């Protein structure tokens, strides 16, 4: 069952990504589909520099809300950064890697909402 806090966290992540001009931001509801997390927030960036800027901004914005980042992967290469906040996992991709991995199709059963900021 999704709580307000879970969806608020996904919204915070999406908004922070949007602040840094992330493109094609999708919030996926994985409640009852994934045992690992309740939400994915997936977005695209034009470059590895922008991927890092988006990741840094998400981390800063959630830290201000006292939300702790549990785990971060891929930051050094910055082609696909995964940020694990427990009930919400952010995926920040350079565009061609996002198309290659196609998480939206992989998790096709999940309800997807496009974030408009």
Image: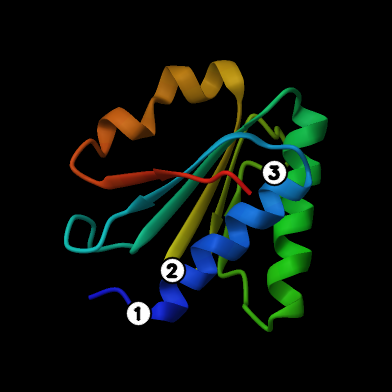
Q: Give residue 3's mark.
A: 1
Q: Give residue 7's mark.
A: 2
**Image position of 12 (left or right of 112):** right
- Separation of marks 2 and 3 at Cα, in angstroms: 25 Å
**Residue at 53 percent of width and 21 percent of height:** 97
Task: Pick whichever of labels 3 and 1 is earlier in the sequence.
Answer: 1
Q: Check if mark 2's residue and mark 1's residue have beta carbons within 8 Å.
A: yes
**Front position in the image: 72 or 25:** 25
- Separation of marks 3 and 1 at Cα, in angstroms: 29 Å
How are the colours assigned in the image? rainbow
Q: Check if mark 2's residue and mark 3's residue have beta carbons within 8 Å.
A: no
- Separation of marks 2 and 1 at Cα, in angstroms: 7 Å
Secondary structure of the residue carrying numbered label 1 = loop
70 in relation to 20, above or below: below
Q: Give residue 75's mark.
A: 3
Give residue 95's position: percent from left, percent from top: 59, 21
Which marked residue is nearer to the observer: mark 2 or mark 3?
A: 2
């Amino acid at each position: 069952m999704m709580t307000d806090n879970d969806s608020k966290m996904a919204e915070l992540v999406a908004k922070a990504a949007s602040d840094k001009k992330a493109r094609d931001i999708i919030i996926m509801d994985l409640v009852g589909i994934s045992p690992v997390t309740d939400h994915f927030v997936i977005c695209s960036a034009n470059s590895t520099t922008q991927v890092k800027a988006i990741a840094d901004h998400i981390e800063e914005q959630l830290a201000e809300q006292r939300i702790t980042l549990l785990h971060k992967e891929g930051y050094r290469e910055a082609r696909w950064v995964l940020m694990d906040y427990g009930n919400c996992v952010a995926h920040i991709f350079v565009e061609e890697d996002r198309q290659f991995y196609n998480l939206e199709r992989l998790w096709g059963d999940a309800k997807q909402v496009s974030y408009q900021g």
